[in-house]
Image (cartoon, rainbow, N blue to C red):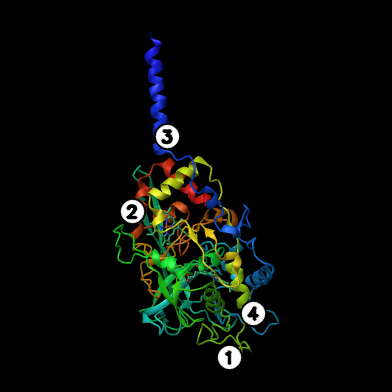
Amino acid sequence: MKKTPLFALLILLVCSCSEDDTNDTLTNIPDKEARLYAGGKTTIFANTSFSFDNPAPNLNETNLALHLAGDMQFEQAFVTAPSIVNPGLGAQFNNTSCISCHPKDGRAGFPMDINSRSGFFLRTSIPGTDPHGGPNPTPGFGGQLQNHAIYGKQPEVKFTITYQDLPVHFKDGTTVILKKPIYGITDSYIPMPTNAMFSPRIGPPVYGLGLLEAISEATLLKNEDILDVDEDEISGKANLVWDPVSKTNKIGRFGWKGGAPSVMVQSAGAYNGDMGITSPLFPNEADAGQSNGSPLEEKAPEITQEILDQIEIYCQTLAVPAARNLDDPKVIQGFQLFEDANCIACHIPKHITGIISGVPAISNQTIYPYTDLLLHDMGDDLADNRPEFLADGNEWQTRPLWGIGLTNLVNGHTNFLHDGRARNLEEAILWHSGEAKKSREYYTDLNKSEREAMLAFLNAI
Ligand code: HEC
Ligand code: HEC
């Protein structure tokens, strides 16, 4: 007689437990199989320190040959003219090869010494716009500040950096102190105009970019909510930028403010602005005022269209690493929290690509990049206060999150955001404000184990 109530209680307990389970705890990520193949058929299963540096496995023979030729170009280091190989560096430059700023096709770490050759630089402009609505170049300096120069020439500037502490308090009493970088310049070769604005940037990863290029304009525009009609405090605006190839305005997709319409324009711009290499697309030196002594200068571009075509397809067709550990209960919990925190309002998980002519490998793919490629106000602490086409001084483009958990394995660091200021994934979330303030607060309200789950999810996609 004594045992019966206990038994009954036990049954009651078990029942209520399993009821709770079905209500609250997800046992599976619903579209797990599809999420695993983050880059559709371009996905590669290579969980190594070279996870970002693989050709898409579905490339046809012609495109694979172009990709491999582009791979070589990506690694070429340019030197001072005259030279038999790769002449034409500078006169001013930030670094000497693509790979030096996109190590192993991944992201550059924040430099220990801000003036070492690294993946970091400052863009610049003065108020107003250029004839195409883009940034108004700073007289004597252009659109980008080069802190290195070839022998006998002067760098445009040296960069300076100081930090301000920004404490963030969690609901459970934990405090994290963010370090807000404050940039400046010194040693400029001529006086810097007093109204010059600066925007810090760091080299992002370059895999999966053709897939992002292949998402249709209509899809991106459908996700815009410029006037926040749905009143979720999240707007989202496509950047509209000048495309020197088609000589029309196109949606900006690349760069931290979506300032470039295509992989081609971004890459030719990098040759020009980052290394001082002219091309058919950008035939004039970026560093007006100081010649680099190249015999080719003003006669023919320093690299050919053929090289641009190779580098374009290379960056378009680097394989996307597969997601990992999607069956891990922590990751499944993190998936749910990522949804509940409304991270998905901007980091839209899934897209279907349209068609890029000549590159079937990246066309018609179901992909999980976790971005809307739109601009969002991210608050004053993240602001660069420098407009770029339609992006204002507070706006940044939502970054793709695919493969982000492999950053440490590939690049040996966890520096995130547009200038690499976040020292880990948690800090990247804590810097979110403006339109993403509610999402950040959702995160700082979580307990430790839930926060770990959210990070486990980020590390798994
Ligand atoms: C000095 C460092 C540096 C060098 C050299 C450099 N990059 Fe970059 N790269 C960057 C930075 C910084 C950005 C972000 C630019 C921005 O926000 O406007 C970037 C962005 C890109 C992007 C867009 C990625 C995205 O997701 O938006 C591509 C593509 C790219 N670079 C390709 C190249 C190629 C190709 C080369 C060589 C021709 C090259 N880069 C050389 C620093 C560099
Ligand atoms: C309002 C739009 C928005 C929301 C909501 C949002 N993000 Fe972001 N996220 C961005 C933008 C824009 C950036 C780039 C900011 C920058 O570089 O300064 C970014 C960057 C990131 C990065 C760093 C990416 C990189 O390549 O360095 C991570 C990680 C990230 N977000 C995670 C999250 C998580 C987790 C949530 C939910 C808690 C979230 N985001 C909510 C817009 C958003």
Residues at discs 4 and 2 in contact (Cβ within 8 Å): no
**Toward the viewer: 267 or 196?**
267
Q: Are marks 1 and 2 in contact (CB under 8 Å)?
A: no
x and y, in percent, of residue 162 in the image: 42, 64
Q: Amino acid at mark 3?
A: Asp
Residue depth check, mark 4 versus mark 2: number of the one nearer the observer: 4
Which numbered disc, 1 or 3, marks the residue that appears first in the sequence? Answer: 3
Q: Which residue is mark 1?
A: 298
- Provide the residue designation for mark 3: 21
Foreground: disc 1 or disc 3 = 3
Which amino acid, by three-letter code, is at mark 2?
Lys
Marked residue nearer the N-terminal end (1 or 2):
1
Mark found first going from the N terminus, 3 or 2: 3
Q: Are marks 4 and 3 in contact (CB under 8 Å)?
A: no
Instruction: Residue 187: give x, y in percent of width and height.
Output: 46, 77
Q: Are marks 3 and 2 in contact (CB under 8 Å)?
A: no
Let me know if residue 452 appears in the view.
no
Quarter of the displayed picture in which ligand 2 can be seen: bottom left
Q: CA distance from mark 4 to mark 2?
A: 48 Å
First in sequence, mark 4 or 3: give its number.
Answer: 3
Q: Is mark 1 within 8 Å of ligand 1?
A: no
Front: mark 3 or 2: 3
Label placed on residue 438: 2
User: Marks 4/3: CA distance?
Assistant: 59 Å
